[in-house]
Image: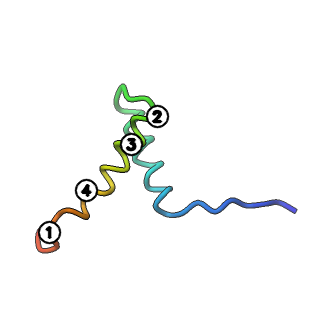
């Protein structure tokens, strides 16, 4: 039997942004992940009427 690991949609988005940051900058994976979490959290601080 094969065990599957659940990966949340949020973690998939973090990984996508992290990979883009790592590929297009000089950042290491750990720094890119921290920045990716901040990038994905930023829209939550934009007022709804502006979004």
The mark nearer the N terminus, 3 or 4, is 3
Q: Between residues 16 and 37, which one lies in front from this camera angle?
A: 37
In whole angstroms, how far apart are the C-alphas of marks 1 and 2? 31 Å
Q: Earlier in the sequence, mark 3 or mark 2?
A: 2
Residue located 46% across and 61% down the image: 10
Looking at the rendered image, the quarter that the C terminus falls into is bottom left
- What residue sits right under mark 2 in the picture? 29
Residue 25 position by quadrant = top left
The residue carrying mark 1 is 47
Q: Is residue 33 left or right of residue 35?
A: right
Q: Secondary structure at mark 3?
A: helix
Choose the circle earlier in sequence order: 4 or 2: 2
Marking on residue 34:
3
Secondary structure beneath disc 1?
loop
Where in the figure is residue 28, as x and y percent of width and height?
43, 29
Q: Residue at x 40, y 47 (%)?
A: 17
| Distance in Å between CA atoms under marks 3 and 1 | 23 Å
Q: CA distance from mark 3 to mark 2?
A: 9 Å
Hey, which residue is sitting farthest bottom in the picture?
Answer: 49
> Label 4's element?
helix
Q: Which residue is mark 4?
A: 42
C-beta proximity under 8 Å, tags 1 and 2: no
Please tell me which of labels 3 and 1 falls first in the chain: 3
Q: CA distance from mark 4 to mark 2?
A: 20 Å
| Residue situated in front as seen by the camera: 17 or 36 | 36
User: What element does badge 2 sit on?
Assistant: helix
Which mark is nearer the camera, 3 or 2? 3
Mark 4 vs 1, N-terminal side: 4
């Amino acid at each position: 039997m094969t065990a599957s690991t659940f990966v949340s949609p949020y973690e998939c988005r973090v990984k996508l942004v992290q990979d883009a940051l790592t590929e297009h900058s000089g950042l290491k994976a750990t720094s890119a992940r921290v920045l990716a979490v901040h990038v994905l959290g930023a829209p939550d601080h934009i007022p709804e009427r502006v979004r």
